[in-house]
Amino acid sequence: MIQIEQTFMDFLLEHQERHKRSYHFLILMNSILNAAKRIQFYYSTGALRGNLGMTGSTNIQGEDVLHMDMIANELVKHSLARSGRVVHAIGEEEEEIIVMNEEGGRYFVYYDPMDGSSNVPHNLPIGLLFGVAKRALEGAEDMHLRAGREYIAAGMFVIPTGTFTIALHNAGCWRFHLDETFNFVKPTSMMLPISKKTWELSFNSSKRETYAPPVQKWIAENEKKYRFRYMGALAGDFHRILLNGGLFMYPAIVNHPDPRKNRPQGKLRLMYEAAVVAFMCREAGGGAVDENGKPILDIVPEKPHQRTALYIGSKPLVDEITKVLKEK
Ligand code: AFP
C-alpha cells in the first residue's frame, strides 16, 4: 500500500466542512499557495537567472528594492486578484491600499512578499508573510484596517526551505512541508514547548545599546540562560521560536548615539509582520506585546504601513518582559 500524505488543501477542506464554512477561503488559500510556490521557484533559481540584485529604486519604506522584492510582489498581487476573493490588500512594497474586488470580494489580505531581503543576495531564507481578515457579511462594511485580533488566519512560508506554517482562528497552528510533487503535506501541530531546555533568545545584538535601559538590563540578566540565534529575517527567526520556544525581540530604538536614527515606534510593520506572527504565536500557546507591553493583537492600525516594536514567544518570557516594559 503506498503512503499518501494529507495535503494542506485536504486539511483545509476538512476544516471548512467540519465548521460548515464556505469554499471561498479554500480558493483564497489556493491562490496564496500558488504565489508561494512561484516565489520558491524564482528564488531557488535566482542566482542562475541573475535575479538576486538591486533594481536601483527605493520603496515606500525608504528601502532599496531588490529584483526579488518586485518579482515576489507581482506574483502575490496577481494570485490574489485572480482569486476574485479579495476586497483589498496591503503589501510591503505597495504605498497605497490595493483595491481588488470591492463588490464581490470577501477577505482583506495583508502581506510581506519578501521578508528578510538582506538575506536575498546570499540566497538565504526569506519569508512570505500573510494575514487574512473577513469583511462584514451582514450590514455595511466600513473598510477599516483590521487589528490582529480580527484576523481569521495568518501564515508564513520560509523560502527556499519549503516549510509553510499557518494558524486558523481557534483552530491551532500547523506546519506543512513541500514534497516532491510540489504539494504542502504532513500537517504538524505547533505548540511552543513548555520546557525551557530548548528556549532561545533572538534579537539584533549589534543594536542592544540603542534599546531602552530596562530592556538592556533584562537582556544582560537573561541572555546567559538561553542560546542566542538571529538571522535577520523575522520569518526565519520566528520559525525557530515556534519549534524551540524562547523570545524574539525587535525593541524600539530609543538610545541611538545619533538621535535621528531613533525609532521609538519600532521597525517592524504591524499589519503584515508583527500581527501575522502574533496571531500564529497565540494559536501556538504563546504571546506578543509592543514597547508598552500592550498585546500586538489589540493594536488597531491607523495607517497601513504602521510600525511597532515586537516582543514575541513563550508566555513566561513575554510576561517577564511585559512587566519590565510596563514599569519603565
Ligand atoms: P526587510 O524585509 O526589509 O529586509 O526587513 C526584515 C525585517 O523587517 C525583519 O524580517 C527582521 O526581523 C528585521 O527587519 C531585521 O532588521 P535588522 O537588519 O535591523 O536586524
Image (tube, grey):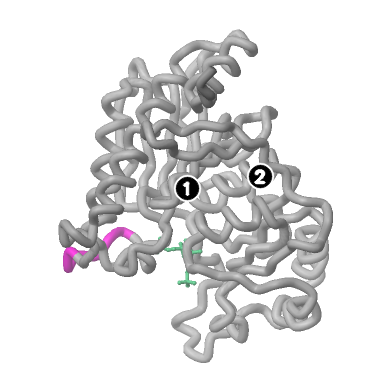
Q: Residue at x 46, y 33 (%)?
A: 184
Rendering coords of residue 16 (x, y %): 57, 15
Image depth: mark 1 or mark 2 in front: 1
Ranked by sequence position, the earlier of labels 1 and 2 is 1
Query: Which structural element holds mark 1?
Result: helix
Rendering coords of residue 307 (x, y %): 50, 59
Which of the 4 quarters of the picture holds residue 63?
Answer: bottom left
Q: Magenta includes 58?
A: yes
Rendering coords of residue 214 (x, y %): 75, 79
Dot 1: few (<14), some (14–19), or many (≥20) neighbours within 10 Å?
Answer: many
Which of the 4 quarters of the picture holds residue 264?
Answer: bottom right
**Farthest bottom residue?**
257
Q: Is residue 187 above or below residue 246?
A: above
Q: Magenta includes 308?
A: no
What amino acid is labelled 1 in the image?
Answer: Tyr
Q: Total of numbered circles in the picture?
A: 2
Asked if residue 74 lies left or right of residue 226, the reply is left
Q: Any mark on residue 272, and which?
A: 1
Rendering coords of residue 87 (x, y %): 37, 26
Q: Is residue 115 above or below residue 80?
A: below
Q: Residue at x 51, y 73 (%)?
A: 263
Q: The C terminus is located in which quarter?
A: bottom right
> Which residue is at the front of the view, 22 or 102?
22
Q: Residue at x 28, y 55 (%)?
A: 69
Residue assigned mark 2: 298
Where is ligand 1, by quadrant? bottom left
Query: Which structural element holds mark 2?
Result: helix
Would residue 45 be visible to someone looking at this image? yes
Q: The N terminus is located in which quarter?
A: top right
Q: Magenta stretch?
A: 55-60
